[in-house]
Amino acid sequence: MTEKYLYDEDEIQWLAIAYGAATSTEEKKRIEGQIIEETIETVWPDDAPEEKGFPSGVARLAALIDLRREYHFPKIGHHIEEEIKATRDGQEETVDFETRPLPYASQFDLLGYAAYFEGKHEGLCRYFRLRAFEQMGAFDNLGLLRAREEAGELTDAEREFLETL
């Protein structure tokens, strides 16, 4: 099994900038492939988890608010609050990988990648944050979250929490 590691930071920055500056879908797919192939080396076993997807809108906000109430650690809380603010402000775009990089990474490793990309490439930053939150159980009940999305509104307690941010 091959070691999992990130290559030189300059290479990561270059790939992130190139992805952000790409003008065509084909170019974005090519660079995404490079990110997976060159930046994050992973051996994919047959039982690699399938992409589950992340909820959006009200469902994502509700899940993140619940997660934030559970975690009182400042570093994790910072990441959750940043994602709550971005979702609240309608910034739901993340990088969408066809095959998941680092399928078995811990939440701490994923938050480390999110911290690295913060301010450099928001799509990658948010992707790794959401993956970490998924690992923490925020999106375990996708059926319930989809029902929340259809309802289209937060509870009074959730709205109060948003106002405190």
Image (cartoon, grey):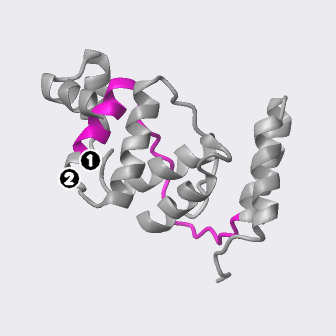
- Residue 106 visible? The answer is no
Where does the C terminus fall, quadrant-wise?
Answer: top left
**CA gap, disc 2 to disc 1?**
5 Å
Q: Which residue is mark 1?
A: 67
Q: Is residue 128 above or below residue 107?
A: above
Of 105 and 64, the residue lying toward us: 64
In magenta stretch: residue 28: no
Q: Splitting the image into 4 quarters, where does residue 148 fall?
A: top left
Residue extending furthest left?
157
Q: Amino acid at mark 2?
A: Glu
Label 2 secondary element: helix
User: Magenta region: which residues?
Assistant: 40-68
Q: Which mark is residue 103?
A: none
Mark 1 neighbour density, 10 Å: few (under 14) some (14–19) many (20 or more): many
Label 1 secondary element: helix
Of 134 and 17, the residue lying toward us: 17
Residue extending furthest front?
164
Q: Which residue is mark 2?
A: 70
Residue 152 horizontal side relative to residue 40, left or right? left
Percent across and percent down for residue 146 are 32, 28
- Pointers 2 and 1 in contact (C-beta within 8 Å): yes
Residue 101 horizontal side relative to residue 49, left or right? right
Percent across and percent down for residue 87 are 43, 30
- Residue 72 visible? The answer is yes
Q: Residue at x 22, y 42 (%)?
A: 66
Percent across and percent down for residue 53 are 47, 40
Q: Is residue 120 above or below residue 35?
A: above
Q: Residue at x 32, y 29 (%)?
A: 59
Q: Is residue 14 above or below residue 156?
A: below
In magenta stretch: residue 47: yes
Q: Amino acid at mark 1?
A: Leu
